[in-house]
Image (cartoon, coloured by chain):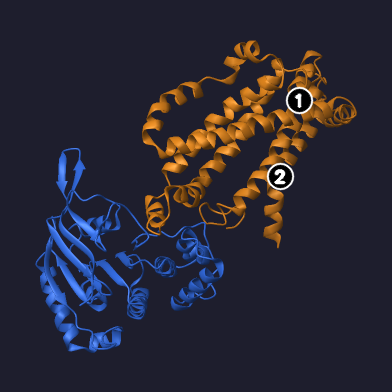
Amino acid sequence: MMRRLIWRILPYAPALLILFVWWVYWTIKQPPPSVIPAITDVIKTGFELAGGRLGTDFLASMSRLLGGAAFGMITGVIAGFIAGLYRPIATFFNPLVVFFNAISGIVWLPLVIGWLGIGNALAIFLIWNTVFFIVFQNTVLGVQLVPEVLELGVRSLGGSRWETIRSVTLPGALPYILAGFRSGLGFGWRALIAAELVGATTGLGQLIFSGSEYHRADIIIFGALLIGGIAMLMDRWLLVPIERRTVQRWGLVAPDRRR
Amino acid sequence: MSADKIVVSGFRHYFQSESGPVQATGVIDVTIREGEVVTLVGPSGCGKTTLLKAIAGFINPSEGQILCDGHQVRGPGRERGVVFQELAILPWRTVRRNIAHGLEIARVPKPERDRTVDRLIGLMGLVGFEDRYPHELSGGMRQRVAVARTWAADPAVILMDEPFAAVDAMTRLTLQEELGRLCATTHKTVFFITHSVEEAVFLGDRVLVMTKRPGTIKAVLDVPRHGKGGRDWDSFTGDPEMRAISEQVMHLVHAERV
């Protein structure tokens, strides 16, 4: 009973700890608000923004993130499957993947502004550019690590090539694919905000940018808290439940919160 | 005399390695007749798994040919079911869905599929575990599922590659008896590979003995089955004829120590 309660509280503990330290520090030192604002000021700013531009910015960012991430995940999984199943294709594309993966999306930003202009397409492209490579590389690894004996077993049950892909390779690679989704989504947020700082007129990136122009630390910190908070919620309520119902249920990865 | 089910003639296999081809087997000729259980015993590395893989269609023989029902084997197929040594059932399917997989692939209607699966779950002592996933089962249970899965698909020939090597000795005795009973009641054609002499004699209607690498068939021994004779360990160990055959096979295998 007590153990269960501790496990429930544990994930929220670090956030509470940081808020506590922040509050203590601010109360003792009373720094100028442009360096570190009070928690109460940040909350107040949050409410003000919620009554103003926040809704538009939030929706703009979320639609870009989900659009770009979905695009990156789908293309990453498909390309990863093809490369994972056919060695020659993997060997052909591997240098290219290493090459482009090393180049941060920001490098392309000035060029892409010229190609796509400022707005959604630009942000979606930069998110795709981040998510694709992470998901691709994870998928290739996952596909290649599925034990061959599982495929042979299904083949000798009369399964076609397609049947083995559907019933063996796809679920077998899922732990790696989901790990790719989780880290891809995290890096997707980074790409989104980077894109919005210069390449958009709305969005949470623009909100933070406006905060920095007027030295409004409260807006910047509120924006950061919001981004981190949404990312945490999405991970916890979207991706973790998928893992729990699939790869954990199947015993492919150790279950969380049980020892 | 029953029809020839599997005919291996002039089979020989090489593997490619960095330093050129490595001979995996000598020239092998084997005939497996319909409804018989043929066991193959040989030292490790003699090429017995290579032979089984070739019959299964997982590798192309370097020399010779393999016929199943008169047709040349060109790849895996549902008429040749395989039970592997390692865990080959799918971790993401429950016991029931693993056993039903071959029938799903063959598009057998659900009511008929359920009947077959239920029958095998009963035969293999898996009642109560239908909705478990493999990681929730013991090693012996998992191999039961693997055997049931292959039987459910109703192949003409069942190839087994040391299926009980990885389970504990106690469980192995039970699984061997269950398999013996399953073979006797379903009249399947079975080709069973092992490195255990007792297992080979206990299960086989005929026992093939292989030489060490590159392996060839060194001897073929008939194991007479008088009625239910020797399909359980009590009657097997008490039967002097069985003991004599086991000793004979033991001598043959012993000479092939690596």
Q: Where is residue B178 in the image (x, y as percent from the top left)?
A: 37, 78
Which chain is home to disc 1?
A
Q: Position of residue B257 (x, y in %)?
A: 12, 63
What residue sits 32% from the left and 78% below the top?
Answer: B180
In-front residue for pair A129/A25 = A129
CA–CA distance in space, label 1 to label 2: 26 Å
Q: Where is residue B85 in the image (x, y as percent from the top left)?
A: 33, 62
In-front residue for pair A254/A139 = A139
**Element under disc 1:** helix
User: Residue tagged by mark 1?
Assistant: A204
Q: In this view, does A95 lie above or below B249?
A: above
Which chain is home to disc 2?
A
Q: Quadrant of residue A255?
A: bottom right
- Identify which amino acid the numbered label 2 is placed on: Ala
What residue sits 70% from the left and 63% below the top?
Answer: A1
User: How many other residues sit within 10 Å of disc 1, few (<14), some (14-19) or many (≥20)?
Assistant: many
Q: Earlier in the sequence, mark 1 or mark 2?
A: 2
User: Residue tagged by mark 2?
Assistant: A13
What shade does chain B have?
blue
Q: In which quarter of the image is residue A68?
A: top right
User: How many other residues sit within 10 Å of disc 2, few (<14), some (14-19) or many (≥20)?
Assistant: few
Chain coloured orange here:
A
